[in-house]
Amino acid sequence: MKRRFVVVAAAAACAAAVLGSARAASVYGYSAAGEWFSPGEAYSGPYDHACGPWVSNHFSKAEGAWGLITFIDPNGNWRRTKQGGGWLRDYLSAGESSGWRKKPHCKNNAWVPYQGGCFGMRESFSNCV
């Protein structure tokens, strides 16, 4: 019985190591850091794909700067839109991120210009072709 437990534990550790090394997230900026956003100005990243899905979207700006972030699908539909001042962020789990193509989007919703930066995290799967 003890030997069976050791074998199962070793197999689980190997599987976790393989699965853990098969994916890693990288940060991608889709606007320049410190970019000046005119009223209504927006930026979008590229669409993702199965080997590199977007898993987060961020808009870093001052607390009083009103803006939004969203993900846009290829049909132009906005999903998971958030508005507000300060740093906006949205995180997708692996399950939430898979199964649909999307690109991150950020926009100045204020009547005044301000500085900010938009970026997101993309998973990259090393065993993907």
Image (cartoon, rainbow, N blue to C red):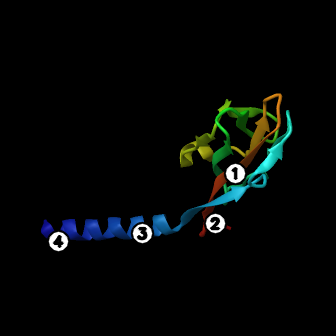
User: Circle 2 sits in a helix, a strand or a loop, which is it?
Assistant: loop
Furthest residue toward left: 1
Q: Earlier in the sequence, mark 4 or mark 1?
A: 4
- Between the residue at mark 3 and the residue at mark 2, the CA separation in whole angstroms equals 17 Å
- Between the residue at mark 2 and the residue at mark 1, the CA separation in whole angstroms equals 24 Å
User: Circle 4 sits in a helix, a strand or a loop, which is it?
Assistant: helix
Q: Nearer the viewer, mark 2 or mark 1?
A: 1
Q: Amino acid at mark 2?
A: Cys
Q: Earlier in the sequence, mark 2 or mark 1?
A: 1
Mark 3 — residue?
17
Q: Nearer the viewer, mark 2 or mark 4?
A: 2
Identify the residue at horizontal 79%, vertical 35% (top origin). 108
User: Which label is found at residue 3?
Assistant: 4
- Between the residue at mark 1 and the residue at mark 3, the CA separation in whole angstroms equals 29 Å
Indicate the quadrant where residue 90 lies.
top right
User: Which label is found at residue 43?
Assistant: none
Mark 2 — residue?
128
Q: Nearer the viewer, residue 96 or 66?
A: 66
Mark 1 — residue?
119
Q: Is residue 99 visible?
A: no
Q: Earlier in the sequence, mark 2 or mark 4?
A: 4
